[in-house]
Amino acid sequence: MMQTLRKIFPYSVFFGSLLALAWAISFGNLPPADFTFVNGTEIQSVDPARVTGAPEGRIIRAIFEGLYRSLPRKGQPNELEPQPAVAESCTISDDLKTYTFQIRPTARWSDGTALTAHDFVWSWRRFLHPETASEYSFQLHYVVNAAKYTAAAVEPGDRVEIELTDRKKPYQTFPRGTILAGKLVKVQKPPQPEATPAGNRKEKQTLLADWRQRWIYTVEVKPMLDGEVDWKSSGNVRDFCKISDPHLTPMTEQCLHVLPHFESQVGIRAIDDHTLVVHLKNPTPYFLDLVAFYPLYPVNRKCVETHGTPAWTKPHNIVSNGPFVIKFRRIRDRIRLQRNSEYWNAASVQIQVIDALAVNSDTTQLNLYENDQVDWITSVPNSIIPELEDRNDLLKSPMLTTYFYRVNVSRPPFDDVRVRQALNATINKREIVDSVTRAGQIPARSFVPPGLPGYEPGLSGAFNVKAARQLLADAGYPEARGFPKIQILYNTSEGHRDIAEVVQRQWKNHLGIEVELKNLEWGVYLDAVRTGQYDIARAGWIGDYPDPNTFLDMFVTDRPTNQTGWSDSKYDELIASAAAESDPTARFDILRQAEQILMDQQPIMPIYFYVSLNMVRPYVKNFYANIQDVHPLLILQVNPDHMHNNLSRRGLQ
Amino acid sequence: MLITLWSVFTISFFLMRVVPGGPFDRERALPEDIQRNIDARFNLDLPLHRQYGAQLWNTICLDFGPSFKLSDYTVNEVIAEGFPISASLGIIALSFAIILGVTAGVVSAIRPHSLSDVLLMSLATLGIAVPNFVLASLAIVVFVFVLPWFPAAGWGSLSNIFLPAICLGAPFAGYIARLTRTEMLEVLGHDYVRTAYAKGLKQRHVIVRHVLRGAMLPVVSYLGPAVAGIMTGSLVLERIFAIPGMGSHFIDAAIQRDYTLAMGMVMVYTVMLYTMNTMVDIAYALIDPRVTIE
């Protein structure tokens, strides 16, 4: 028996290996796409409410569409402007606070059903819902009571909605459990816990969140009449609490959420199928830009509620409304998009099939491009930029992104504004962009990047060694005597290290202070900056919408984005009054004053403004560089001859 | 095996949690209540020992849960897509390494110290010495740009597989070649080989039936480490050639603190290494006539 096994063994191994080899080299036939681009990292999701990154944005802009869409301006294609998309028009009230959108009657979902104003109400409610935990939810907080809805902020007297604990699947927010509506009578709060003095911010927040869970809400639940809440009649008074332990009264019912009543409180209403009315807290001149931004794109209610999250995002389940639909996805390989024949403007979309490749490495991207395997790459390795400088297929454009250093003003010696100014005045930013980054970046003296029409940024002090030495002496450190050793913190990356080394040398040479460099891996670095465990920390900020406010709002006292410990009441007032100002020129003037304070006080030191680098084949039409680095796929055109060439070249692929 | 898996699970679980930074760290801090909702969805709100228990139970049920970072997918789906890709890359690299390595070793051993021997063995040494990512960069320059034979990167057709497979297999081909040559030379000196020649057998017959069989034993036992090496080596190469296999998923999972995905990957790698080593042991027993099977 064993002998036969021994005899058979070599043959079985041989044939087994042959079979394995045959399996390994068998590939399905993949017809090439008409247009292929490198999308960077693998996307986290195609759910517009749950993502923030640029690669995700490119896919979501292709498969979904909002009321408006950012497209190149006619005559000035290098500027983007929001143009009507699902909405065919928008009327703005005289006080600039009410926007009425007319939904296009031809707007449809990819399953052929009509897209209505109710889809937007539902999608925005989902977007704002605390359980969706959308990082971008603040983009809709300009709407009346929207921020309260996300924060679940309710007060006695408010109309509230209560979700009971009878969801079909507890972790699926939609479809929701039974919703009751009523008037909040009172909130019984147990005594607020005292945080131990030694406890850090995180522990304090946990304590407070635990405490909020124990609140008991007394609500007069109103009856329903013809599918509407009957606010006029009186209802039953019931007690609700988010945890099951009824610690005060035995009658307390458990609930999942107590939120402001969406239909009557939040300023988003569908008047009929084709009219959506949005009420804003303040005139927001960039509201149409926000509406055109992908987190506010609608998702299909039926699709989400039938399949649940994340199953609804699968290519065979998803229902979308953009110019393209997802044909298939291969993780960390590619997403194949196909033209959506149900799209209202499908006739204007020229490209039929698009491949978005997930490639992490910049070098690999360039290899693919140089080998004619892709038509567009979204980043270029820094080291090779000087050699590509003269090529006409390298598109370079300043971006709405600033590279800057945060200063921890709660730590001496940085609590002295003169020290911060001295440090800023001795960074030679020109040297950094010329000798380190070398991709045409622009040295920064302001925090808001240039290129926003009508806005003149407030400037920080220029490079001036003499003045800086004087400032340092005034602060009590003549010739840096007694100045402690300071540390620059950055997340691990060669680029950040090179810049930090230059700054280190400049401060040493010009001011004579000792600087230490410290790098941390991304997650750890974020943690350190958030908890204030740093002296000076590298940071970058990408503007979310083309308006100075997206930058300046970050440094209002106690904003989660502040992270410097800096606080200035004048600054906070200016930012708040800019939000209430309806005259655009006056508003920009207020914002400029605010930026001037920020630049004088210097809790941050701007280093340079980013440039976006794209390489795109010359035969791709309608591709324009712009400060938001957004390149709509639906308007791209590829010369058919080249498409044909592509096919033969891709024979390789 | 179960004990191995359990200890690997435990060590990785705690290592992942000990490293500072979590999967949902981002530059914009979320309000505490919203962060709680996210944590609750992924069981991150439980005390550590209960997280451990829950994840261990799921792992035993072969359900690694949803991926934290690829939020449209579960870890099982990621493995189901990534594993076949890495497997076919590995199989081709290993086949290439064995075929080339054994052939080169035999050719060298038949005429030791001849020109072909010196040449092949220098190449083999070079193959062992040059790390695979250096080889990959060179190969891209030569076979993609100078000679436009292969695509630079990507996955989806046969032509995509050659460069990565060759770069992955090269060091092992080199090692196998040297191993085969040494063993062949030793076996050639044995009495039974001389007997075989004395019987008047043809050289080919002697080499294939008698010498090679004896010389193969160390090569077979080397296959265990070779498989391990190919699996770990593909981590880097998948990155360079943008191959959507297990290696790419593993690296990204580790960098992005995707706890569940990283755990899934570690478990699959452990099972693979364990199985491969066991299979090599069995093969060894079956090939070597001196081992008695009970």
Image (cartoon, coloured by chain):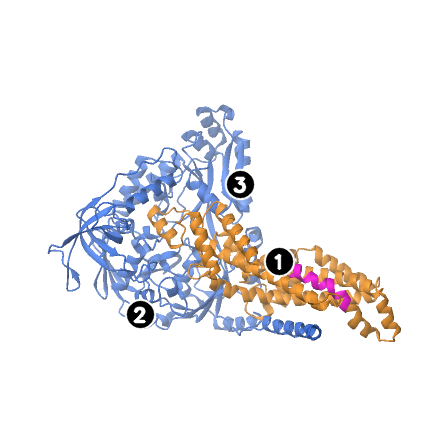
Of badges 3 and 1, the one in the foreground is 1
Question: What is the CA distance from the residue labelled 2 to the residue labelled 1?
Answer: 49 Å
Q: Which chain is orange?
A: B
**Is label 1 in a helix, a strand or a loop?**
helix
Q: Which chain is blue?
A: A
Q: Quadrant of the N terminus of chain B?
A: bottom right
Asked if the magenta segment contains residue A225, the reply would be no
Q: Give the image location of residue A161, x and y in percent.
A: 22, 54
The amino acid type, in three-letter code, at marker 1 is Gly
For label 2, the crowd category at 10 Å Cα-Cα, with few meaning under 14, some 14 to 19 and many 20 or more, is: some
Total marks shown come to 3
Asked if the magenta segment contains residue B219, the reply would be yes
The amino acid type, in three-letter code, at marker 3 is Glu
Residues drawn in magenta:
B213-231
The image quarter in which residue B126 lies: bottom right
Do marks 2 and 1 both belong to one polypeptide chain?
no
Q: Give the image location of residue A204, x and y in percent.
A: 35, 39
**Is label 3 in a helix, a strand or a loop?**
helix
Residue on which disc 1 sits: B233
The one of A550 and B9 positioned closer to us in this rendering: B9
For label 3, the crowd category at 10 Å Cα-Cα, with few meaning under 14, some 14 to 19 and many 20 or more, is: some
For residue A431, the mark is 3
Question: What is the CA distance from the residue labelled 2 to the residue labelled 3?
Answer: 53 Å
Residue on which disc 2 sits: A108
Say whether disc 2 or disc 3 marks the residue closer to the N-terminus. Answer: 2
Q: Are marks 2 and 3 in contact (CB under 8 Å)?
A: no
Question: What is the CA distance from the residue labelled 3 to the residue labelled 1?
Answer: 40 Å
Residue B181 in view: yes
Q: Give the image location of residue A339, x and y in percent.
A: 40, 71
- Tag 3, which chain? A
Identify the residue at image location x=56%, y=44%: A435
The amino acid type, in three-letter code, at marker 2 is Arg
